[in-house]
Image (spheres, rainbow, N blue to C red):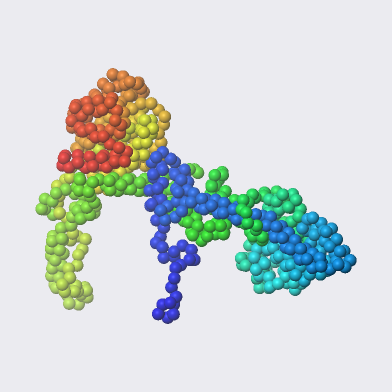
Amino acid sequence: MSGYGGYRYGSYYGGPDPLEPPYDVRGAVDALGDSILGGGDPASALRDLLRRGLASRRGLDDLLRQVRDRQRELRRSGRLDGILEQARALLDTAIGQERAELFPDPGDEARLREAELDALPPDTAGAIRALSDYQWRSKAAAQTFEQLKELLRREILDSQFRGIKDSMSGAGGEAMARVRNMMAALTDMIEADERGEHTQQDFDDFMAEYGEFFPDSPENLDQLVDSLVRRMAAAQRLLNSLSDAQRDELSGLMQQVMADAGLAQEMARLAEALRARRPDIDWDSQRGERMTGHDPLGLGDATTALAELADLAQLEQALRQDYPGARLDDVDEDAVRRALGRQAVDDMEALKQIERELARQGYLENKEGKLELTPKAVRRLGDTALRKVFAALAEGGYGDHDQHDVGQAGELTGATRPWRFGDEQPIDAAATVRNALLRAGAHEAARSGQDNDLQPERAVPAGQVPLDVTDFEVSETERRAATAVCLLVDLSYSMALRGTWSAAKQTALALYSLIRTRFPQDSLQVVGFSNYARELKETDLAGLTWHMVQGTNLHHALVLAGRFLDRRPEHNPVVLIVTDGEPTAHLRRDGRSWFDWPPSPETIELTMAEVDKMTRRRATLNVFMLADDERLTSFVDEVARRNGGRVLRAMPDNLGAYVVSDFLRSRRERR
């Protein structure tokens, strides 16, 4: 209890935290990227994400696991024929008590009563029916028999109206009359609704009169009908779960008890109204359940267990999402709440929100029914890949880190010039303030020469210098050398087999992000090569899939890279090659690819010719090997000998760190 105004504070249980910051799907984009970069399409990647969930929210698989655990728990909770066992035990107790009372009596009446007990039908319902008018000699037996009838009345009513046995004040005639009146009023209300004459006020009046019979507190007639229909269907499944003999015995018991209590007619009328209300349910085909527990269940508890199992079966199907047109909106929030609790509802809502927010925040778009990543999402994947790369770099190993206090320009020359829109050079504070002071002094001198009749401008407070956009000056810097970067990535079938496909794409995205954010004056070309080579834009990389084709056409990739460098003669050339095999294909004069294994001499010769051209362009070739192969080692060693570049052996986990750090090292050396 707080000491301020008597307020009480505690945990919030009404749903998601109302003070939680706005939903951020960038983590979801990163999770999607892991699947997409591995070769999956956005739709399947989104399904995988929803199945796994996020760090703070459970996914569909976790909810499914919880549903199945609950199903096993319910099936082990007890036996469905428990009411028959309980009824038979009480009946045998009453008969035994009566026989004990009759045995000492030597008279003929006692013998006649014993004969009557001996002639009772073997089934419980028949025996109860035969004893309904029996005059008990034993008070204990009469009390036990009355206890049996009260048990049956309560359990049978509880099988139709959940929790009614706890709300009934007694099982006498007055209590049964109130139950009968409730059923009659409920049936009248359903029939009035079918005629279009029902109002919400009618329902509120009904609940005010009979609300204690419905502890789940439905808010309208539809909710009440749904609850009763679920209960009726579960009661039918209970009967279908029993053997033929048990089913006949329980049906007879229920009919006998309802008739004795004067409820049979109203119960039949209500059941007919409910069946007419829900014609979509095939009442005669309700599937039975196999319960594996050992403890006997009461009829009401057994019906509750079967109703919950039915809900769980529907919820399981919705959560599996394995049917055509499956959507998360198909999952019933009320069913999730009943089965798994409030936290599961919040988790489910978070999953639904993922897809909505991915589209709303511009990361996913639907093109002709197909989900695709937007350029914004691809840039996010690149930024994330770059952060992972820098996190993998050894601390202090390369001296590369984010630096927010300098611009993108080169070394300062000491000169200044007026600021122009788009300038990245640092502001020269001293020159800017000097310009403002000179401008203010000139303005003051001009104003002092004006006529006194003119309205003077608002004076500037002492000690303050007003700045105008024309006052700003920037420091002149040397022009920073630009770099033309060519990243040649092997996309042959062997890359997918070795599991390096995703790492290669992440590396390319990281390099795109690095150049876009830190070196915008540089130019980057990514070339993917298998049987042919082709340029890959940043937006192409995420959805790039591999094809089962033969060939590692490094020759074609070097040709495309050479054309890219030739168009930028003023740039410093950097060429990085990522591959897991020696060249096995080349481009013929007719533009068609030629494949051969082992590599033909022409393939090696043409590839080495392009290596020599790169050397004449002053472009150093650094090769990142993703496989420890003797023939590949021999080839890249020859490339290094002829070009002067380096050979680095990399694993998929550190490929990005190797490529980015090598690019940064090359820039520093050339600068």
Residue at the right extreme, as displayed: 108
Query: Which residue corresponds to the image point at 50% horizontal and 57% vertical from the top-left?
Result: 344
Spot the residue most to the left: 414
What's the residue at 19%, 72% (across, down)? 460
Q: In the orientation shown, which residue stands out farthest toward the top?
A: 601
Q: Quadrant of residue 231?
A: bottom right
* Quadrant housing the N terminus: bottom left
Give above or below for 593 relative to 175.
Answer: above
Residue 653 appears in the figure: yes
Q: Is residue 193 visible?
A: no
Q: For residue 429, what is the image quadrant?
A: bottom left
Q: Is residue 358 left or right of residue 469?
A: right
Left or right placement of residue 360 versus residue 401 in this view: right
Q: Position of residue 136 (x, y in %)?
A: 81, 68
Residue 451 versus residue 577 in the image, above or below: below
Residue 133 in picture, x, y percent from top left = 83, 66
